[in-house]
Amino acid sequence: MWPTFESIKYFYDIKCYTNDDIKTYVELGCLTKEDYARITKEEYQDDKEDGIPEGHY
């Protein structure tokens, strides 16, 4: 699957990606929440506090 964990981490490490970019990859299903933590060294925070997916009310 492209992009791979390794390629995403590489671009993060050379400052091409921000934490928000890595979060987007989690939302797209390219990375897991655990991958996010491995790359950013921070715990993944889900912005959807109410548990309702965006656009569904």
Image (tube, helix red, strand yellow):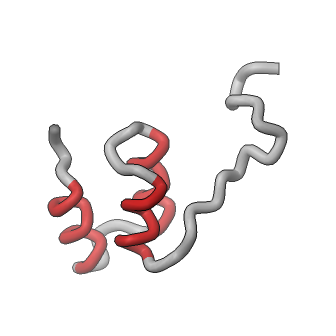
For residue 52, side relative to residue 12 (left or right): right
Q: How many marks?
A: 0
Viewer-side residue, 47 vs 16? 47
Residue positioned 83% across, 40% down in the render: 50
Residue positioned 39% across, 48% down in the render: 25
Res 53 quadrant in image: top right
- Relative to 52, residue 49 above or below: below
Tell me where residue 12 appears, x and y as whole percent: 30, 71
Tell me where residue 39 appears, x and y as whole percent: 36, 71
For residue 38, side relative to residue 24 (left or right): left
Res 41 quadrant in image: bottom left
Residue that lies at the very extreme toward the front in this rendered image: 34
Tell me where residue 55 appears, x and y as whole percent: 71, 23
For residue 5, side relative to residue 38 (left or right): left
Residue positioned 45% across, 69% down in the render: 37
Tell me where residue 36 appears, x and y as whole percent: 43, 62
Residue that lies at the very extreme toward the top in this rendered image: 56
Res 6 quadrant in image: bottom left
- Relative to 34, residue 13 above or below: below
- Relative to 40, residue 46 above or below: above
- Relative to 39, residue 45 above or below: above
